[in-house]
Amino acid sequence: MNGRVRGWAIAMRSKVFGGFLAFLAVSVGAAAPAPAALFWMPPDFSGAPVSGGEPGIGLAMPGATEKELQAHLIWNMRAGLNVAALQCQFSPSLLSVRNYNDLLRQHSAELTAAYTAISGYFKRTGGKKWQTELDQYTTRTYNGFSTLHAQLGFCETAGSIGREALDRPKGSLYLTAKARMREFRNSLVPSGDRLFGRVTLLAARPLPPLNEECWDKKNVLRKKCWTLASL
């Protein structure tokens, strides 16, 4: 092979190899893990910020102070993320268990303060039965996040809220609770994604004709009365 041909062959091999590397880079980039998600087009559960006393956010706390309502929001969000850690393990990509455990460590002081404030509310308003009322509050708050038919939307939302909560500096967990508790509650409502809505089909089978001339002595439907509805 002369020098000119050899040089052309080397150049072509380099060009092909360079193209292969470019293709490989694109392929690797395309194979990078996507953000944790369960829906191709997630439903829009967004809602306005809340202060804690709005209907539908949690159990009613009549007479609660602003500090107690803030604690109420934080505790509700914690309960929801705890339920998600139990119910959403079918999708490991959401990291619901790890994020919840990390949340407890990172925001332990704010969570402890929230529980103390809530306990103070029931001591102040519950009289001698304050401990029982506090226990009922805790149980009902957790039960309020249990879902079956809305599990996908709930788990998707919980995963997003958990990640945001971990991004918050210590002492500012309540900002996530205020901004996203309405969304968290909205996610408990069964919903399809934006491309394929939730459709329920109900088909009632009509009764056959009941007039006597349509039935023989053996209670068999006569052919003259057959219809598609009665078959």
Image (cartoon, rainbow, N blue to C red):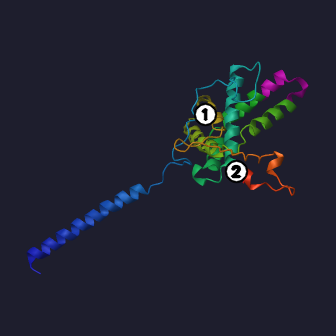
Residue shown at 74%/32% (left/top)? Answer: 115
Residue 228 lies, in percent from the top left, at 68, 51
**Quarter that holds the C terminus:** bottom right
Mark 2 and mark 1: Cα distance apart in space: 50 Å
Residue shown at 68%/20% (left/top)? Answer: 66
Could you tell me the amino acid type at mark 1?
A: Glu
Residue 173, label in figure: none
Which residue is more in the foreground, 189 or 9? 189
* Horizontal side, residue 128 vs residue 114: left or right: right
Tag 1 residue? 183
Magenta range? 119-130
**Quarter that holds the N terminus:** bottom left
Tag 2 residue? 227
Residue 106 lies, in percent from the top left, at 62, 40
Magenta residue check for 158: no
Could you tell me the amino acid type at mark 2?
A: Thr
Vertical relation: 140 (above or below) 84: above
Residue 193 lies, in percent from the top left, at 56, 43
Which residue is more in the foreground, 170 or 128? 128
Which residue is more in the foreground, 149 or 164? 149
Estimate how packed mark 1 is, as few (under 14), some (14 to 19) or many (20 or more) residues with alpha carbons within 10 Å: many
